[in-house]
Image (cartoon, rainbow, N blue to C red):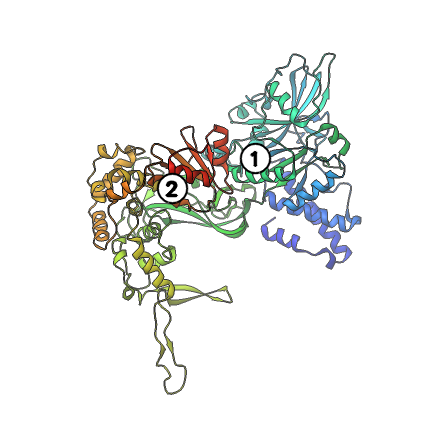
Amino acid sequence: MTQTDISRVLSADPAELEPAERQKLAAELAAQIEEHREAYYVHDAPKISDKEFDELVHALEDLESAYPELARDDSPTQKVGGYADTEAFAPVQHVARMYSLEDVFSVEELDQWFERVAKSVPAGTPFLSEVKIDGLACNLLYENGQLVRAATRGDGYTGEDITANVRTIEDIPTTLNATNPPARVEIRGEVFFPSDEFADLNASLVEQGKPPFANPRNAAAGSLRQKDPNITAQRPLHMLVHGIAAWQSGDAGAQEPTQQSQVYDLLRDWGMPISPYFRVCTTQDDVHAYITEFGERRHELLHEIDGIVVKVDNIALQEELGYTSRAPRWACAYKYPPEEVTTKLLDIRVQVGRTGRVTPFAVMEPVLVAGSTVSRATLHNAHEVKRKGVLIGDDVVIRKAGDVIPEVLGPVTANRDGSERAFVMPTHCPDCGAELYEQKEGDKDLRCPNSETCPAQVANRLAYLASRAALDIELLGEEASLALTQPLGEPPLKSEAGLFDLTVDDLGEVEIEREVKKNGVPTGEIERVKYFFTKEELYASGEKKGQVKKPSQPRANTLAMLDEIEKAKGQPLWRVLVALSIRHVGPTAARDIAAHFRSMEAVRNATVEELLEVEGVGETIAQSVVDWFAQEWHARIVDAWAKAGVRMADEPAEESAQPQTLEGLTIVATGSLENFTRDGIKEAIVGAGGKASSSVSKKTDYVVAGENAGSKLTKAQDLGVPVLNEKQFQQLLATGEAPA
């Protein structure tokens, strides 16, 4: 089922259909759900994204709710999970049924669930919140402390016997660490494939000529459901347990816990692997905060997650609330907005970056993910394309989290029809024609050697030097950089050397091609327009017909851009160093180098040994700086900027003007601050003699936390690093004394 087919089915309005058409729609939805459920649970090869599958299920649920006559006893809406493959694995009857969870897709829906639960539980009832592991549900049966059986969820009643495979997972004890274990206990959990090892697995499969997995969840399922346990043993599978489904005490057996949170303590004592991320929340607001926190941290965890599970902590209350036909009333699963979707890979092209690195990127059918429409995604290098096993024409799974650049996770191999083709990396630069090369033997990246004049490299360096990380020049973005370096005619700039000599007269004839839009909608037509100046207006009739009515003149943004370029001449030395695009020299290294040498002249004359004396500068950075200044054309850039008035030194007077109150301190800033920008607080720290770090460690002295502080604040709390609010930081900055 293609995305177009899904959209067609979901767009149908049942109220506008005849009864026979509604019945046909219900049957089509049911058939598609069953097809995709089998692909997901049995073959470990989903053909559509989780979001698209959820949309199909909810569409059928809504249809059956509005028209009860369409609901069948064998409807997919009445089933839990998938299937048990009894041909490949022996069937197993669970001691207690494995239910699914009620899904909620917004905070509003979550609060509605809270309202329903509140009618049946005392005020102040605590809730246990935990991350929902995106793995394979697994059921472990222990008798008198010994593991006797492991099974998949299957349809909730019958699963697959995977005992031999589960015994290969080191996390799972074969014997419980209990003096008096229950006579019989059924423990539930999730088997997962670590996120950071997923790409390596797919690479090995591709090398063996086998289809790669679409995502880590399918990698876990495919690894665990191997007929040969030796193959499972080779995979880095892990498990986290999260509950007890059935409990039969022996004569002197352990007592069953009364709280869900106590279950975790007991499981830990037994030697079972439990999640480090669960938390007991006393209020709805606490649950909301937990959801927000792990939404920000989700890609830092041991495993992928697809939501948050919220449970009534009291087990007696759980029993009172009971179950629907498919889900417990005492728990629900909050689903984060989708970050993974499937779309068609139309082509793989390459782009040349500011350092000459040639990067393949995916051109895809536009698709909405993580709140924005995506049509391009990075593929890093030719080696990575091969590792992922993607072919042009594939349906692919892409991920986008917030402002993170979209990433292609892998292909949906089950959807291939034979028309797909492999990507071939070019041998020559697409922008200047230079032959591409490996910078060193075995390098995964290819580079264009024509650094000085390659139009793509010049344009990208120009855009980078104007970025917030460098000279922070407003209105000089990617499009303006392209107009300056790659217009239709002669470019005003052939390198960044002439940037600070630009005048308004240099920009009058710059023209580009741009797609025509009508009422904001692209038409597909291309027109030639002036970029920096307005279009000349002519008289349309009368005696002056054809004569100039209003001459072409600089746009307001053009004048503002030139003003910003002029202001940038006064930026501190470290920003100028960043703007030069020296490999490996980002803002942190540039600050350290500028603070040590104080002038551009001293930096360009420094030896590797002298650079190594700078704290935080290693062999790679030191050699890169020396190699950069050894290039004659690089020296011409520095000389041209200096002649144009760009600041080339931080005067010693400036050093003594500000008290070094933070000398010797390493400080990390996170979140939004009222009186400091992100760069502003770093400059304040460095200016006062401190070190502005981007990551929290045991060596961090303080973390300054503003609003919406995320994982860095959490890590600081975990490590016991002192946390300051903005007012406390300002006190430290002013006095050098830590607030009490």
Residue type (three-letter) at the residue carrying disc 2: Lys
Look at mark 1 in the image and give the residue it sits on: 217
Specify the quadrant of the image occupied by residue 122. top right
Q: Residue at x 72, y 21 (%)?
A: 247
Q: Position of residue 215 (x, y in %)?
A: 53, 38
Q: Position of residue 541 (x, y in %)?
A: 41, 84
Tag count:
2
Q: Position of residue 331 (x, y in %)?
A: 69, 35
Residue type (three-letter) at the residue carrying disc 1: Arg
Q: Position of residue 694 (x, y in %)?
A: 41, 37
Q: Is residue 230 left or right of residue 499?
A: right
Earlier-in-chain disc, 1 versus 2: 1
Q: Nearer the viewer, residue 612 or 735?
A: 735
The residue at the far bottom in this view is: 543
Q: Residue at x 67, y 45 (%)?
A: 109
Q: Nearer the viewer, residue 206 or 201?
A: 201
Q: Nearer the viewer, residue 8 or 132?
A: 132
Q: Considering only vertical position in the picture, is 358 above or below 713? A: below
Q: Is residue 614 left or right of residue 390?
A: left
Question: Which label sits on residue 262?
Answer: none
Residue 485 appears in the rendering = yes
Look at mark 2 in the image and give the residue it sits on: 682
Residue 226 appears in the rendering = no
Q: Is residue 295 left or right of residue 655?
A: right
Q: Counting other residues with Cα less than 10 Å from the Cα at mark 1, is it few (<14), some (14-19), or many (20 or more)? A: many
Give the alpha-carbon distance from disc 1 to disc 2, as whole Å. 40 Å
